[in-house]
Amino acid sequence: MKRIISIVAFALALVSCNSLIEEFQPVFTTTYEAPKPYAVSEIEPNITIADLCAMYITATPWNIDRNLIIAGKVSTTDKPGNFYKSLYIQDETGGIELKIGKNGLYNYYSPGQTLKVRCFGMTLGMYGYKSGNYGGQGMIQLGYEDPTKSYETAYFESAYFIDSHILPGEVGEEVVPAEITEEQLPGPYDTQSTNQYIGKLVTLKNLTYGNKIFCLMYINSNMEKTLSANRIFLSDKTWGVTTWAMSENKFKEYFDSGLWDEVKIGNSGDYNYGTVGEPNDPGFATSKADIRAHSSAYSVSQYFKMGNTDIALRTSGYSKFSDEEIPQAVLDGTATVDITGVLTMYQGTIQIVVNSREDIVIH
């Protein structure tokens, strides 16, 4: 009997411990060993990044069926949380995003490390294209064929696929950003094949605050995100957002302040669903409490000016610095900023994405 009681007690203790483990999972902060060089000396690049991007036809994702190999240095890190399941590499001609579907990429690929990429079997596509007078190009990416056809590329997540296509080499000096002028910035219909700085690490100097933001939010993240009645846009002014982005808690703080009560629900020209303060579509929200219940972290584009050109500084709501307040001197225009990050395009708009808060220098 004592033996049975002991076994039962041990089992209960084990269940209790497991419950505690699940409830109090630690935040992973350890770094694995530095990536080791891969034996890829027999594999040589046979096409540049710019020339690969030139093979992309707008709105036509290409499942690559040729033995094309590119090489480039890693220019990004996801450790501060501003890049998600992807990294950028660049050569002399341009840069491109690799949509590797796993977190903690900094443990496997270091900034300055050379990667060779076997493109056969991958999909070359674009994210962020918009047609029309107020549209433009997005970013050409390397990913996997999207089975849902919702996007031109998807993340490739199979370990075998990653290991057989992304071939890490030696870790060298980190990429030195190119300092570029307003005249060197891309136009709305430029891609990596026509402007050498798109997708590369650059430094933009002496930017002034643009007094506007862009943020797309959803009333219910569990419902169809493309439906107008489920979408809220913050644009054309700051709407009181004075942080680089917003975590879920910061979203609630802004939301509860009432600063957004007059924001219309829906796409531009399709505002039939009331305002954030008084939503009137019962299929999506019947009160502010309904919207708040589905709160989330959100990326924000804080706009800056480089001369007469708008630059959107895109920051993830999951980055470590998302809730940091932008200095008042920047907001009121008495200070300028230098920004180092990857130059990207979205619907013809120039964006820059930093690796960390240290890449934003205030003067």
Image: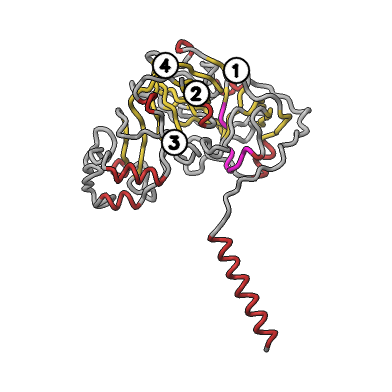
Residue 361: mark: 2
Mark 1: few/some/many CA within 10 Å (<14, 14-19, 20+): some
Q: CA distance from mark 4 to mark 1?
A: 24 Å
| Cα separation between marks 1 and 2 | 27 Å
**Residue carrying label 4:** 306
> Whole-Å distance between the Cαs marked 4 and 2?
15 Å
Mark 4 lies on a secondary structure that is strand
Mark 3 or mark 4: whose residue is earlier in sequence: 4
Q: Earlier in the sequence, mark 4 or mark 2?
A: 4
Q: Amino acid at mark 1?
A: Thr
Which residue was labeled with disc 1? 93
* Bounds of the magenta segment: 96-106
Q: Secondary structure at mark 1?
A: loop
| Residue 190, image x, y percentages | 47, 18
CA gap, disc 1 and disc 3: 35 Å
Asked if the magenta segment contains residue 202, the reply would be no
Q: Quadrant of residue 161?
A: top right
Q: Pointer 3: residues within 10 angstroms few (<14), some, or many (20+)?
A: few
| x then y, percent, for residue 344 | 49, 25
Comparing labels 3 and 4, the label whose residue is closer to the camera: 3
Dot 4 or dot 1: first in sequence order is 1
In which quadrant of the rendered view does residue 174 lie? top right
Q: Which label sits in the foreground, 1 or 2? A: 2
**Residue 160 picture location, percent across and down:** 67, 44
Mark closer to the observer (4, 2):
2
Q: Considering depth in this image, is 139 or 363 the residue closer to the camera? A: 363
Instruction: Point out the image quarter for the N terminus.
Output: bottom right
Q: Nearer the viewer, residue 207 or 113?
A: 207
Q: Which residue is mark 3?
A: 324
